[in-house]
Image (cartoon, coloured by chain):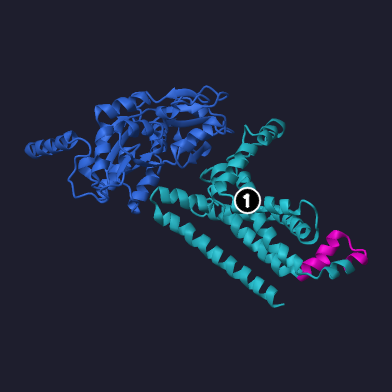
């Protein structure tokens, strides 16, 4: 089947090169209202600058990507999603709730292990040495991409089973960071971008080993709102990328 | 207890029961004082007691963390002196539940005590009854319906505590994942079937509680 394979890869290529926000237009739902973007909590720091550079009003709602996905599923008036992982976006596309033609990777991120000033010096590899009385905070893996990446990383390193009892789950990555900042946990897994302007935590280690999970920011249009699609295109374009880079996001 | 799906049910009932046990004595004393004593700061005390009932749970949770967290003034002392750490423990869930149950108990019990003719207490006191005996032998028999209604409502409120518990006790499967937390986590994860189990259990308990409380109160009014 080499021919059909070639056709398939050609199709994939077309989708990949299709760019952001250029899906089929079905007529805007709300023509003049500013678009509403549901953005992962990890996008909170960069969003105001992105919107400012975009030059048009955009309404944003933040949350765990899983929670936001459920809201879109429940019919929340959201025009564009910007999630911290591909799977919740792909789920929406599969359910026919987001336009697959507009789905695109916007940026990449990095999973970091952080602690408070008096945390023991641990690395991803030595995390099992975390004292039994101390805790590791991660996002609820089924709902928070940062938590899913962290769980993947620890399973990859073979330490998940040993650490499981010491894990505390949070509803989004901002809550994970808050636990670490207040010193309630000795270690926490967040994105490197969450640390923009945060000085009261210490970076213990970065997930940089061969095959480490590579978090990504993925967007898609939910409604045909032209301004929503324009915003998504802007974020994925070089202008948006340079702003995202300023907040520590990696290239897509 | 070992079954992960029944654990939240058992844990929630344990936390609510323990909260009730802890909070009932002070709640009854406060209700009695507020019903019987006229002192200068009475309305201030009234307002403070009501606070956990009217404040958003996130505010209650925030106060608890700021006060009892590892960097909080009380939390720091507890840890350095006794090695006690409250955040992310079932004990933290008990504290959060107790705090929100208190006003509901006080506000239900207070009118029941007020409805007991004060002459009865005067007579009891003149017969040399201690305050505890007075409560047990005079106030309690006359106001028991309202008191039980208050305790039942308090139990239900403790059982349903979510916001402050999530912030203060965290969500640790097998340790602090009460039914409300489990519903939230399951919903977020898209596991509606798992959420529905606890929704049904909590709804059934709440319906029973409201029914019991209203019957107790109806009879109280009918006396």
Write down the residue under mark 1. B52
User: Which segment is the magenta one?
Assistant: B124-142
Q: Residue drawn at (72%, 62%), measured in percent from left and top?
A: B110
Note the chain letter of the cyan one. Answer: B
The stretch drawn in magenta includes residue A167: no
Q: On the rendered image, what quadrant is the C terminus of chain B found in?
A: bottom right
Q: Position of residue B200 (x, y in %)?
A: 48, 62
User: Based on the displayed image, in which of its 4 quarters is residue A140 positioned?
Assistant: top left
Q: Residue drawn at (76%, 61%), measured in percent from left and top?
A: B35
Q: Residue drawn at (49%, 33%), measured in percent from left and top?
A: A177
Instruction: Look at the picture and state if A216 lies above or below B58.
Output: above
Q: Residue furthest bottom?
A: B222
Q: Colour of chain A?
A: blue
Host chain of mark 1: B
Secondary structure of residue under mark 1? helix
Q: Residue drawn at (41%, 31%), measured in percent from left and top?
A: A45
Instruction: Look at the picture and state if A168 lies above or below B220.
Output: above
Along the line of sight, which residue is nearer the eye, B12 or A175? A175
Along the line of sight, which residue is nearer the eye, B201 or A240? A240
Q: Position of residue B111 (x, y in %)?
A: 71, 65
Question: Is residue B190 among the parts visible in the rendering?
Answer: yes
The stretch drawn in magenta includes residue B136: yes
Left/right of residue A111 with respect to residue B97 in the rendered view: left
User: Based on the displayed image, in which of its 4 quarters is residue B43 positioned?
Assistant: bottom right
Q: Position of residue B33 (x, y in %)?
A: 78, 57
User: Based on the displayed image, in which of its 4 quarters is residue A103 positioned?
Assistant: top left
């Amino acid at each position: 089947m080499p021919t059909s394979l070639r056709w398939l890869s050609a199709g994939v290529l077309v989708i990949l090169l299709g760019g952001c926000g250029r899906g089929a237009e079905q007529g805007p739902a709300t023509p003049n209202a500013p678009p509403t973007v549901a953005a992962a909590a990890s996008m909170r720091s960069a969003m105001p600058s992105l919107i400012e550079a975009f030059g048009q009003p955009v309404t944003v709602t933040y949350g765990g990507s899983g929670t936001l996905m459920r809201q879109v599923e429940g019919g929340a008036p959201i025009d564009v999603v910007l999630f911290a992982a591909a799977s919740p976006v792909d789920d929406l596309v599969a359910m026919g709730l987001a336009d697959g033609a507009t789905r695109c990777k916007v940026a990449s991120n990095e999973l970091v292990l952080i602690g408070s000033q008096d945390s023991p010096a641990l690395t991803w590899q030595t995390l099992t040495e975390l004292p039994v009385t101390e805790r590791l905070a991660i996002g609820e893996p089924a709902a928070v991409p940062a938590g899913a990446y962290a769980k993947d990383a620890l399973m990859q390193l073979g330490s998940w089973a040993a650490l499981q009892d010491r894990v505390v789950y949070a509803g989004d990555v901002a809550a994970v960071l808050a636990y670490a900042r207040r010193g309630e946990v000795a270690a926490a897994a967040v994105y490197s971008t969450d640390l923009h302007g945060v000085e009261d935590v210490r970076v213990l280690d970065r997930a940089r080993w061969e095959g480490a999970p590579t978090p990504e920011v993925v967007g898609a249009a939910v409604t045909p709102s032209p301004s929503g699609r324009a915003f998504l295109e802007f974020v994925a374009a070089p202008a948006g990328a340079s702003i995202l880079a300023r907040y520590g996001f990696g290239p897509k | 207890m070992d079954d992960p799906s029944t654990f939240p049910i058992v844990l929630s009932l344990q936390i609510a029961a323990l909260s009730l046990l802890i909070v009932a004595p002070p709640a009854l004393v406060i209700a009695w004082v507020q019903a019987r004593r006229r002192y200068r700061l009475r309305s201030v005390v009234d307002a403070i007691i009501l606070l956990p009932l009217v404040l958003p749970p996130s505010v209650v949770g925030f106060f608890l963390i700021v006060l009892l967290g590892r960097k909080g003034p009380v939390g720091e002392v507890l840890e350095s002196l006794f090695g006690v750490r409250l955040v992310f423990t079932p004990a933290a869930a008990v504290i959060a539940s107790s705090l929100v149950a208190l006003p509901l108990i006080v506000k239900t019990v207070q009118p029941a005590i007020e409805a007991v003719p004060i002459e009865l207490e005067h007579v009891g006191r003149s017969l040399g009854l201690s305050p505890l005996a007075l409560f047990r032998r005079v106030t309690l028999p006359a106001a028991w319906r309202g008191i039980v209604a208050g305790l039942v409502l308090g139990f239900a409120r403790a059982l349903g505590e979510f916001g402050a518990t999530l912030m203060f006790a965290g969500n640790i499967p097998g340790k602090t994942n009460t039914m409300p937390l489990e519903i939230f986590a399951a919903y977020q994860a898209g596991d509606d079937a798992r959420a529905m189990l606890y929704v049904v259990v909590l709804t059934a308990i709440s319906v029973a509680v409201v029914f019991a409380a209203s019957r107790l109160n109806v009879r109280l009014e009918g006396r």
